[in-house]
Image (tube, rainbow, N blue to C red):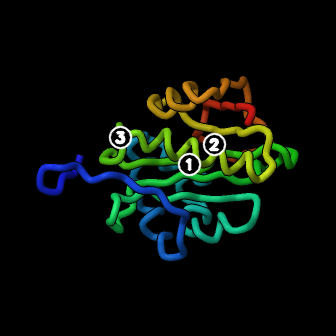
Amino acid sequence: MKETGRLPLALAMRPVQRGDNLALAMVIRQVMTEYGVAEDACAAQGSEVDGMWEAYQGDRAAYYVVTEEGGHEILGGGGFGPLPGADDSICELRKMYLLPTARGRGMGQALLDRCLDEARARGYVRCSLVTTASMVEARRLYERAGFRPLEEPLGTPGYTACDRWFVRDL
């Protein structure tokens, strides 16, 4: 945990901004590399990763960025949007990653809660997500939040490295 003087800095969350693209791409690729799935072209190399602000514009998607309160360094983020290949009532939790310095501080839960609350407010009734066996901490968070494992993905998320699928009602 980074400290200023004796007190650890608090984390903050805000909507993605146009200028966040490069820093977010670096965070996503760093975490994907940490968990051994950076070669998945859809998850780590796709155009969405390099254009996060553009990818989450519109009334059916949102993305939130995690920083240290009062700071500008991006430590992670998460969002949601329509699930490709599914009906309009199902969204997908997307690109939820935190750097190690932001983990274990309650921000994963806060970020997940904000995404789910906002998805519900925008008319979605279910939320799907895909992840990997290597992302043990993330799977625990999702299961504690009421996500149920599936035998196969809903829709067509397109992530070839992801081998775990979940859904929950909103």
Q: Residue 71, how many percent across, how many down?
A: 32, 66
Q: Residue at x 39, y 53 (%)?
A: 30
The label nearer to you, 3 versus 2, is 3
Residue 40, numbered label: 1
Disc 2 to disc 1: CB gap under 8 Å: yes
Q: Residue at x 54, y 58 (%)?
A: 64
Viewer-proximal residue, 68 or 93? 68
Q: Which residue is mark 3?
A: 105
Q: Residue 36, how many percent across, how many down?
A: 43, 41
Q: Amino acid at mark 2?
A: Thr
**Up-down: is 92 above or below 68?**
above
- How far apart, in angstroms, are the residues tagged by discs 3 and 1? 28 Å
Viewer-proximal residue, 28 or 65? 65
> Within 10 Å of the Cα at label 2, are there few (<14), some (14-19), or many (20+) other Cα atoms?
few
N-terminal-most mark, 2 or 1? 1
Q: Residue 142, how many percent across, how many down?
A: 56, 31
Q: Which residue is mark 2?
A: 160
Disc 3 to disc 2: CB gap under 8 Å: no
- How far apart, in angstroms, are the residues tagged by discs 2 and 1? 6 Å
Q: Label 2: state its secondary structure.
A: loop
Q: Amino acid at mark 1?
A: Asp
Viewer-proximal residue, 24 or 153? 24
Q: Residue 59, how many percent across, how many down?
A: 76, 63
> Within 10 Å of the Cα at label 1, are there few (<14), some (14-19), or many (20+) other Cα atoms?
some
In the picture, which quadrant includes the C terminus? top right
Q: Label 3: state its secondary structure.
A: loop
Q: Amino acid at mark 3?
A: Arg
N-terminal-most mark, 3 or 1? 1
